[in-house]
Image: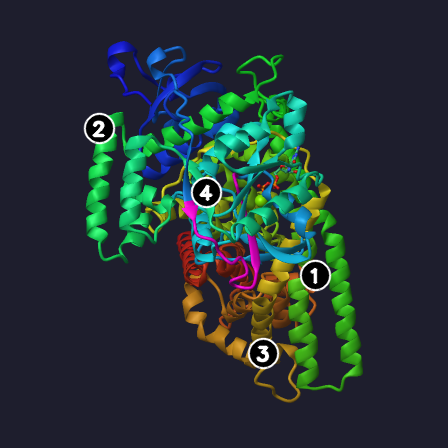
Amino acid sequence: MAKKQDINKNNATRLLDNEPVGRTVQVVRVMGDGAFRQRLLEMGFVRGAKVTVLKNAPLQDPVEYMIMGSHISLRHSEAAQVEVTDKDAAFCDMEDAYNGTVETAVAGVDPLADNVLRVVLVGNPNCGKTSLFNCVTGAKEKVGNYGGVTVDSKEGWFNVGGRRVQIVDLPGTYSLTEYSPEEMYVRTYIRDHHPDAIINIVDAGNLERNLYLTTQVMDMNIPMVIALNMWDELEKSGDKLDIEMLERLLGARMVPLTAYNGHGVTEVLQAAMDAIDESEQETHHHNVNYGPLIEDGLKELGEMCPDLDRYTVLKIIENDQHALKLLERQENAQEVKDAAATLRQQIERNYNDDIVSIITDLKYGFVRGALAEVLTPNPDRATGETKPGYSLDRLLTNRWLALPILLVLMWLMFEATFTLGAYPQEWIENGIGWLGEWIGSTMPEGILRDLIVDGIIGGVGGVLVFLPQILILFFFISLLEDSGYMARAAFIVDRVMHRVGLHGKSFIPYLIGFGCGVPAIMATRTLENRRDRLVTILTIPFMSCSARLPAYLLLVAAFFTAHQGLILMSIYLVGIVVAGITAIILSKTLLKHDKSQFVMELPPYRKPTARNATIHMWSKGKQYLQKMATIILAASIIVWALGYFPRHEGQTPQEQIENSFMGQMGKAIEPVVAPLGFNWQMGVSVLTGAAAKEIVVSTMGVLYTGEADADEESAPLKEKLQTATKPDGSHVFNPVVAYSFMLFILLYFPCIAALAAIKREAGTKWMVFEIFYTTGVAWLVSFIFYQLATL
Ligand code: GDP
Ligand code: MG
């Protein structure tokens, strides 16, 4: 790579943000700070790369760009960080920096040292890792968790040549730097578990960007096989790839693969086994040759720290904080740091750029140089034309049609989940009810019977009734993700979500939240950024879920005669507003240090497979049952016991609950809820509603009518509420009290199932925060409303 000339002398530079749709320009440099800049560089925004402005989102922000054949969307504010110049400005042209590879000798290892043969899948998001994984394992996968961040890896097993091998599906990443949880995860996983082989899956139709990650994986010096996935698409496109030549240039094994239908899977696995077998002897790993200056430096530093791999040594030169931490264990740490700093200055002076860009440029140069020799694009395709697979965008992200189509699709998903799901839900409820009755009639009366029938069966029922909805919903989500539409949905609504500091991808979890918070919280997995995920998880409970509806319906019917629909809607709106305010507060206070960025790839549309969607659906269902059932069940039993004990002979159900621990607690908190206009009965209803919000109505039923099976349509309960009086003769309820009560039900304590989901996705700390925060907000909002309304 030649020294860079002073740009301003020759050509004017502009900001990418100001470029009109349709124009193609060349990248000069990316400004901005660490994580964001690194991400853009990795996505191909390197010096000299050509970018085409494709279109604005329907709400004008973000904007879709094409770079290195892939489509990336950036917000205006992000595009304003990219300096560009005319597309034919010669000084900026990228050079092919292919200098061949250097070989490192690596001592042989015994692959069975820890008794398992382990192979890991590494690749960009959407390159087909999960498809290969499902194909290989028949999807008997296990979902694993790592540390505090819930980034998934899946483990499975397969047999090849009489050997049993573990295969791990790692999260998709564009690189192995430390900037995102996924990257950290993959990097740490490889270092800690030292797998016997890496299968690096690349999208054969997008080699330039995909092989960038490969250059980093190569440096880890672990036996590697490159699976050229989407081979079917490459063949269809008419591009020609000389695999043998590319193998020689990169010094790595390559196998064409179509994970989608299983073509090439056996060959990939066999190649991985061969790589493992060879690693028993001393082998020679090929690494990117960065040219004499950097190579000499790498060698010198490598000798100073023989325990660190080439990857880490290079990162030390890049001044990477995580790599420097690994160095700390060494005695000569300071010496190495000084040497690295000197070298870094020398390199930066030589290339007239900063070290991170230099290394990224060199890696891209290496990839580009190699590809120039082996990839022959289909001569019939005009350059700069978008690839097949994007034509649906003309409709789906069309300026006028995008939002209506999105709304219709969301409505369909919602209807299917909550309307279709209502049938199996009813069967489950009936089945459970029938089981309860049957046991009730066969067992002798007593505490044990009540515990089994009301506590356990009731609790299990509370877990199971959500299952159909979770299964259906995740089937749809999987289709949306696989097809590539999920990224478009985020692209379309990002502008709105960005107003409250969130990413467009939060939109779908929120929407699901109106049905049920549990799957909504589970669906935040599609958000890559931890901060965005947390803020979304913590605000989802303010989306009024369907379990709260019975209480609203009862109260609205009983105390409002006019504008019932509007009043109901206002409750939902209050929830949305509180969620928005909470999101803004959280982004500005507790979570302000994690930066949100939009940079997102818009993958080509692909036909989703029913197989993958089904597997995804089952694994989510299993996850739900395994991880949450225990908490929900235990909590339901506790709530049941609090309402059941202490027992007294000959009490009516009404007296029983009034004298129970729950009733006593309700009376004890009466002073706290009195300023909201509530009496102790309402306090008790709110307490029992903590288990599940549907219970609010049935508790009111018991307390006011003595009937346990009251629902929102029961006329006696409605009348009892209308006529209930306080000791002083005034009415307990009036429209103001009823509204205040509805506000409280909307905002307070999410149900136990939702809390279990929050605990699982965000951790105990945030679950505890959520309990206090939501209840505090509920109290405050009801208090302000009630006090102002009764002035
Ligand atoms: P991951 O994000 O790397 O786990 O990728 P997935 O396995 O979820 O695949 C992403 C998309 O690519 C899905 O829509 C798959 O159906 C599709 N896909 C995977 N492998 C192939 C392939 O070999 N050919 C084609 N045409 N599509 C594929
Ligand atoms: Mg995947």
In the rendered image, is residue 563 in sight? no
Q: Secondary structure at mark 1?
A: helix
Q: Find out if the beta carbon at label 4 lies less than 8 Å from the nearest ligand 1 atom.
A: no
Instruction: Tell me, yes or no, whether the two marked residues, 4 and 3, touch with CB atoms within 8 Å.
Output: no
Q: Which mark is residue 715?
A: 1
Measure the alpha-carbon separation of dots 1 and 3. Answer: 29 Å
Instruction: Tell me, yes or no, whether the two marked residues, 2 and 1, touch with CB atoms within 8 Å.
Output: no
Measure the alpha-carbon separation of dots 4 and 3. Answer: 64 Å
Q: Position of residue 790 (x, y in %)?
A: 42, 55
Image quarter of the C terminus: bottom left
**Disc on the earlier residue, 4 or 1:** 4
Measure the alpha-carbon separation of dots 2 and 1. Answer: 83 Å
**Disc on the earlier residue, 1 or 3:** 3
Q: Which residue is mark 3?
A: 641
Q: Residues within 10 Å of mark 1 (few under 14, many from 20)?
A: few
Q: Position of residue 266 (x, y in %)?
A: 68, 44
Instruction: Tell me, yes or no, whether the two marked residues, 1 and 3, touch with CB atoms within 8 Å.
Output: no
Q: Position of residue 731 (x, y in %)?
A: 53, 64
Measure the alpha-carbon separation of dots 3 and 2. Answer: 73 Å
Callout 1 amino acid: Ala
Is residue 619 in the magenta section?
no
